Image: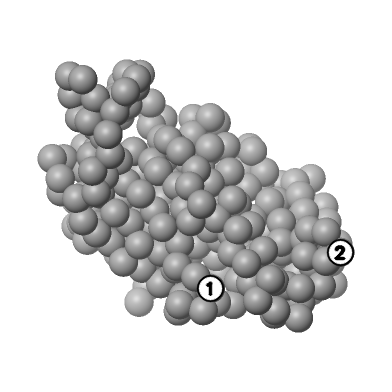
Amino acid sequence: MPSRDLFPSDWLVTGAYRDTRLGVIKTGKESEVHLVARTGSDRTTLLAEKRFKARDRRSFQNNYTYRGVWGEGTFRESRAMKKNTRFGHEVAHGRWIGHEWDSLVLFHNAGITVPPPVERLDDGYLMAFVGDGERAAPRLSEIDLSPAVARRVWDELLDEVSLLVSVDRVHGDLSAFNVLWWRERAVLIDFSQTVEIVTHPAAHDLLTRDIAALARYFVRRGVEVDIDRILERIGADVHRFTRQLGDVHVAGRRAPERWRD
C-alpha cells in the first residue's frame, strides 16, 4: 500500500495559508527537521521541513561514493568540486539537496511509501509530517515488532525495495534507522545517499548492503533472510547492473554483511 493510502488526497492545506514553525523534530548528521503548522481558512496541516546543514557542519562529509554521476555539472562546477573550493562546496551542497528532493518526488510518484513531497526550498524542502498530533512517528529501530508482524513488515519492505529497483534506484543508506513506523506501516525516509542503478558504479554493492543492513533488525525477530533469493525477487538481475558487473572493482559481489550485531 503506497503512501497515498496513509494520506487522503486532500491532506494538504491549499489556497491562502500561513506557516508557523513549532520547533525542531530531529537533528542529524547532515540535516535538521523542523515541525511546521500550515494553517488555512478552516484547518491546519502539519509539515516537516528538512534543512540541510552546510557541508562544513556535517559529520558526514565524504559523499563522493554516493554523489557519483549526479555530482557532475559544468566544467567549472566539476573543477571547483574536485578542488574543494568555496564555490565547489556551494555547488555540491545545492546538488545534494536537489538530489534528495528529486528522489522523494520520484518515489512518491512511483507509489513507494514515503512522506508526500510539498515544496522545494533553498536549503531543503517541505514534506508531509509523519506522526500523530505533534509527536513524530518513531523509527523502526525503536520498535520491537512481534515475529508475526515482523514477517509481514519485512515482506512489505521488500516490495518497497522492488519498487525502488523498478525506477532504477538504490536507497544507499537503508536500515531500520531510516524507516519510520506509523499506523502499523513502514515509511521510508532519508534519500540523500540514493544512487541510480544504471549510472552509479557501486549500485549493486550498495543495494546488497542495504538489504543486509535492513535484514539485521528482522533476523533478530525470527525472519529468515536469503540475499540471493531477495535480489531475484526484487528484480535486481544482471541486466539492470550491466555496467557495474562489468567494472573490475565490483565484478565480484562482496560477501553479505553479518546480519546480527
Residue 202 in view (yes/no): yes
> Where does the image place residue 253, in percent across and percent down from the top left?
69, 67
Q: Within 10 Å of the Cα at label 2, are there few (<14), some (14-19), or many (20+) other Cα atoms?
A: few
Above-or-below relation of 247 to 124? below
> Where does the image place residue 130, in percent across and percent down from the top left?
27, 42
Q: Within 10 Å of the Cα at label 1, are there few (<14), some (14-19), or many (20+) other Cα atoms?
A: some
Quickly name the residue at label 1. 55
Above-or-below relation of 139 to 58? above
**In the image, what residue type sits under mark 1?**
Arg
**In the image, what residue type sits under mark 2?**
Phe
Q: In this view, does 182 lie to the left or right of 117?
A: left
Q: In this view, does 107 lie to the left or right of 147?
A: right
The local secondary structure at tag 1 comes to helix
Numbered tag placed on residue 179 in the rendering: none
Residue 200 in view (yes/no): no
For image coordinates 29% across by 28% down, the residue present is: 17
Q: Quadrant of residue 43?
A: top left
Q: If you read the primary sequence from the N terminus, does the residue marked by circle 1 or circle 2 appear first?
A: 1
> Where does the image place residue 226, in percent across and percent down from the top left?
51, 56
Colour scheme shown: one colour
Above-or-below relation of 146 to 60? above
For image coordinates 55% across by 77% down, the residue present is: 61
> Where does the image place residue 31, in percent across and percent down from the top left?
41, 64
Q: Is residue 110 left or right of residue 132?
A: right
Quickly name the residue at label 2. 75
For image coordinates 76% across by 69% down, the residue present is: 250
Q: In which quarter of the image is residue 156?
A: top left
Residue 241 or 221: which is nearer the viewer?
Answer: 241
Mark-to-mark CA distance, 1 and 2: 21 Å
For image coordinates 42% across by 35% down, the residue present is: 118
* Quarter the C terminus occupies: bottom left
